[in-house]
């Protein structure tokens, strides 16, 4: 019985696949992961960055927390948002998700 096990193991090791054959599934997983997850995320990030850079005074916007407001003043990194008459809040530009 022990002899059978060692013979079966020896027969299996004689036909080792090449290094490329062993790495091919891993390479395919990485490529699929890149195509379906990383590329769309990069496109979405680029689109949001362009949107944020296009914001101007008077734009009606929605923040990531759900606040609706009008931009009163826009700086490079943040904006002053009027959410009600006389109620202004300062938020980072990146937290603005859409125009209202």
Image (cartoon, helix red, strand yellow):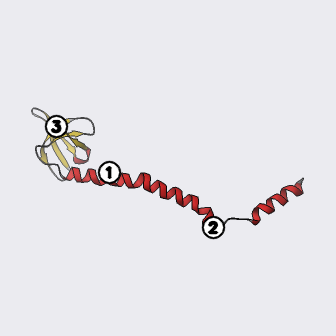
Q: Position of residue 61 (x, y in %)?
A: 19, 40
For residue 12, side relative to residue 42 (left or right): right
Contact between labelled residues 1 and 3, with CB atoms less than 8 Å apart: no
The residue where tag 2 is placed is 19
Q: Position of residue 21 (x, y in %)?
A: 62, 64
Q: Identify the mark nearer the N-term, 1 or 2.
A: 2
Q: Nearer the viewer, mark 3 or mark 2?
A: 2
The residue under the point 23% across, 42% down is 98
Q: Position of residue 90 (x, y in %)?
A: 18, 42
Q: Position of residue 67 (x, y in %)?
A: 22, 35
Q: N-terminal of the two: label 3 or label 1?
A: 1
* Residue at x-position 89% and y-position 57%: 3
User: Would you say 7 lies left or right of 25 here?
Assistant: right
Mark 3, Cα crowd under 10 Å, few <14 / some 14-19 / many 20+, is: many
Give the alpha-carbon distance from disc 3 to disc 1, as whole Å.
Answer: 23 Å
In terms of secondary structure, where does tag 2 sit?
helix
Mark 3 vs mark 1, foreground winner is: 1
Name the residue that disc number 1 marks.
44
Circle 1 packing at 10 Å, graded few (<14), some (14-19), many (20+), is few
Q: Residue under circle 3?
A: 69
Vertically, is 86 above or below 54?
Answer: above
Q: Nearer the viewer, residue 90 or 9?
A: 9
In the rendered structure, find residue 23 and report the number of the disc placed on it.
none
Give the Cα separation between the discs numbered 1 and 2: 37 Å
Which element is circle 3 on?
A: strand
**Which quadrant would the C terminus be assigned to in this image?**
top left
Q: Quadrant of residue 34?
A: bottom left
């Amino acid at each position: 019985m022990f002899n059978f096990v060692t013979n079966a193991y020896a027969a299996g090791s004689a036909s080792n696949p090449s290094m490329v054959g062993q790495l091919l599934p891993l390479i395919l997983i990485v490529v699929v992961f890149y195509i379906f997850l990383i590329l769309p995320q990069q496109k979405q990030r680029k689109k949001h960055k362009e949107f944020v850079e296009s914001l101007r005074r008077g734009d009606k916007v929605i923040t990531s927390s759900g606040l609706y407001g009008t931009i009163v003043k826009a700086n490079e990194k943040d904006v002053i948002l009027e959410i009600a008459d006389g109620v202004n809040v300062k938020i980072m530009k990146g937290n603005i998700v859409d125009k209202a």
